[in-house]
Image (cartoon, rainbow, N blue to C red):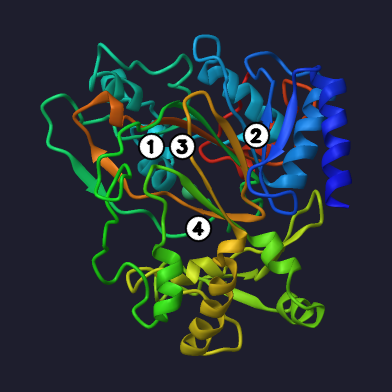
Amino acid sequence: MTHSRDTSFQQKLLSTFGSHSSMTPVLSADRMGRRIRGVDLSQSLSREQATLLIALFDEYQVISFPGQDQNGFHVTNLERLANHFGAPIPHPKNFANYVEYHRQGVALKPLPAHQQSSSRCNAAFPDHITCAKGANSPAVYIVTNLPGSGEHCEEKFVGGLHWHTDIEFEPIPLSTSMFYVQAAPKTRSSPLNTWVPNIKRETGFYHPDSSPELMERRERLPLNGETAYADTAAAFSDLPSSEQLALEKIILRRRVRVNDEGWLIPLVYTNPRTQKKSLHSPIWASRGDNIAPVQVEGMTLAASRHFLDKLEMHILDPKYRYDHLHQPGDVTIWSNFSTVHNAPPAKSIINSPDDARLMYRISCKGSPSFDLPRGDSKAWIDEHISPPYQSTL
Ligand SMILES: [Fe+2]
């Protein structure tokens, strides 16, 4: 079954992108993640090609296109690609006054040129690394350790993040995120022969009552700059059907602050496009005391924690996990409907361009669009994209 699924997609790739295209599992044929070669994303996609890439994405949840030509591929190409998957969402950090805009309705202002993330990246190693064209789009979030870095800096390290799904709580959650990688760290000088040492966290990062076994799964992060993914759809579909039915009835209360009333969301999320179900939200319970915990409706906070920790333990089982080692020229697209991810420990200040991490992220929501430009109405943009932004690519 799995084999025939791959064979069928492989044949479609050959007929749609040509004889040089191919697809391989990143882990194994029965698990999420495919590496797709021979697809040049600097070129516009035909309707047929866009349809196939979105079908691959829906089926495999993480798809990666290695080897994009760094001279020919620009961040503008990434934004055009993103438009097929959904409406790109601008990142608040690209604006000078997003908080005032949000709270007081003042006119939104772009960041002055010298404060833009790309300008700060370009100042680190000006003879070696300059951001690719299109990096200044409001839709692009630059994931990097270049700002503040330079030849004479002292190295600094930062631990990984919590396991999470990006902004999954909005009425229309983000469906898709994607990275284009311009630079990835090359050095492996830490004691484990990895990019960074295994950084031990200060206490309080995760809830202190979680079991040592769960803490071990949460903290086992990759050490070479990989993004770690866990497959929340497979984690759900592997459960006995009686348990699935019970979980589908669970409603969670989410809060930003402890005393907020918060809002309700289902524990099991159904991808509106594929109807694939996933354990979407329990990871949010893992945060430490500084973030209001998720509560299961009808349970005490303590019982909720025990219940959600058990689910998180299941999701973070190594068999659902894929750590993507980023390489320059990779475009990697992941589903926010059926995965959780975690940013790795990293060098946050560097003194060599060999340690540079320079990746461009675009996230999007809404329906895919096989033809471009997208046809989102102004009313839909105003309601669902904040701050309002309509990509013209
Ligand atoms: Fe994230």
In the rendered structure, the answer to whether residue 169 lies left or right of residue 33 reads left
Residue 194 in the image, given as x and y percentages of width and height: 33, 45
* Sequence order check, earlier mark of 1 and 2: 2
Q: Amino acid at mark 2?
A: Ala
Q: Amino acid at mark 3?
A: His
Up the image or down, 303 lies above or below 381; here it is: below
**Mark seen at residue 164:** 4
Residue at the image position 30 percent from the left and 38 percent from the top? 188
Asked if residue 338 shows in the view, the reply is: yes
* Sequence order check, earlier mark of 4 and 2: 2
Disc 2 crowd rating (10 Å Cα; few below 14, some 14-19, many 20+) is many
* Sequence order check, earlier mark of 3 and 4: 3
In the rendered structure, the answer to whether residue 151 lies left or right of residue 188 reads left
Mark 3 touches mark 4? (CB < 8 Å): no
Residue at the image position 38 percent from the left and 26 percent from the top? 110
Q: Amino acid at mark 1?
A: Lys
Q: Is mark 4 within 8 Å of ligand 1?
A: yes
Residue that numbered label 1 is attached to: 93
The residues tagged by marks 1 and 4 sit, at their Cα atoms, a distance apart of 19 Å
* Sequence order check, earlier mark of 1 and 4: 1
The residues tagged by marks 3 and 1 sit, at their Cα atoms, a distance apart of 5 Å
In the rendered structure, the answer to whether residue 186 lies left or right of residue 293 reads left
Residue that numbered label 2 is attached to: 87
Residue that numbered label 3 is attached to: 91
Secondary structure of residue under mark 1: helix
Q: Is mark 3 within 8 Å of ligand 1?
A: no
Q: Nearer the viewer, residue 324 or 137?
A: 324
The residues tagged by marks 1 and 2 sit, at their Cα atoms, a distance apart of 18 Å
Q: Amino acid at mark 4?
A: His
